[in-house]
Amino acid sequence: MGPIQGGVFHDFTQARGAGVLVQLPGLCARYRPAAELLGFLNFTGPTGSFKDSLAEGMIRLAEQKGDLAPGALLTEASAGSFGAALALAGHRTGHPVVLCLPSTVPLLRQQQLAGYGAKIALCSPTQEEGEQRATAIAAANGGYFMDRFANDLNPEYHRRVTGPALLQATGTKLDMVVAGVGTGGTISGVGEHIKAWTNGIQIVGVEPAESGVLTGGFAGPHGLAGIGCGFVPENYNPYIVDKVLRVSTGDGKQTAQDALLLDGLPLCPAAGAVLSGALSLAREAANAGKRIVAILGGSIQA
């Protein structure tokens, strides 16, 4: 839905949209890429990441399918950006939210998530145990486990929203899309939408160099929160991904800093890593004259 009369939107969720396409003149002036490099920004929600729109979109899709009853409980195992986004989206849509967090999560973060409207359930510090607890709480209360790593509503949102918005923004003049891989929802949903239209656009993933599980490496600690979950998520579709780049935490943070200082873009390190990967491709002579778009899904706030 667009703005109402006079250019005023009905509310903030309508105003933030599905993303905007921007040039990167400062970054390009410094690094002089051979290809045209653009950023697709979709982190204008209240918590500073695209997951604000994703969480609410998944809720609406679950309601439409009849899997989520009005006012039913939502659960998830997340102390990160999706947990924050889900807490706010649940409050907005009339669904209470329980987040199952590792007992190691700092008290300040627990209080922040509780301030967003979530109830906190502490559990052992592994993703698997958190998901088991979230599943059990949902089952015992007639609720719905969001299950962002395996729930097809995650990539479905991107098939319906992010992918079409990206193609509309570029006017289908596009040669390569670069996206980070966390839950696998963005790259799979966007990639599936694009590949259903044409095989002429390359889909490129980005993962942390320190945890290169998608490229046959081992899981490891890194500083790119939001990508590189340490395993291959069920929502990740490797068949539509043409290439996966490894980008180090250091390069992600440096590119995020460059984007802030040169172009005024407040990117989180994970988005910086995506932009770093896209920039490396744009500087290759073989890509001269091509149009490369980096999907930048998180801000400093995320």
Image (cartoon, rainbow, N blue to C red):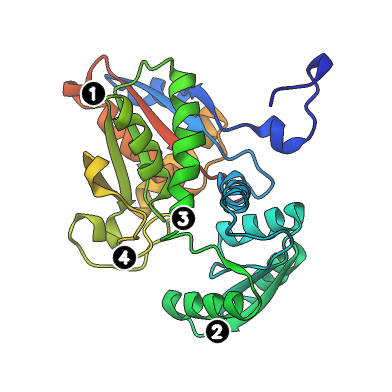
Q: Do the residues labelled 3 and 2 touch (CB within 8 Å)?
A: no
Q: In which quarter of the image is residue 222?
A: bottom left
- Of labels 4 and 3, earlier in sequence is 3
Q: Mark 2 points at which residue?
A: 123
Q: Is mark 2 on a helix, strand or loop?
A: strand
Task: Answer few, some or many: residues within 10 Å of disc 1's Cα (few below 14, many 20 plus, some between 14 and 19).
Answer: few
- Of labels 3 and 1, earlier in sequence is 1
Seen in the picture, residue 34 relative to 185 is either above or below; the reply is above
- Of labels 1 and 4, earlier in sequence is 1
> Which mark identifies residue 231?
4
Q: Mark 1 points at which residue?
A: 200
The location of residue 284, given as percent across then percent down, is 21, 27
Q: Name the residue under label 3.
A: 226
The location of residue 212, given as percent across then percent down, is 25, 58
- Of labels 1 and 2, earlier in sequence is 2
Disc 3 versus disc 1: distance between alpha carbons? 28 Å
Disc 3 versus disc 2: distance between alpha carbons? 21 Å
Q: What element carries label 4?
A: loop
Residue 31 in view of the camera: yes
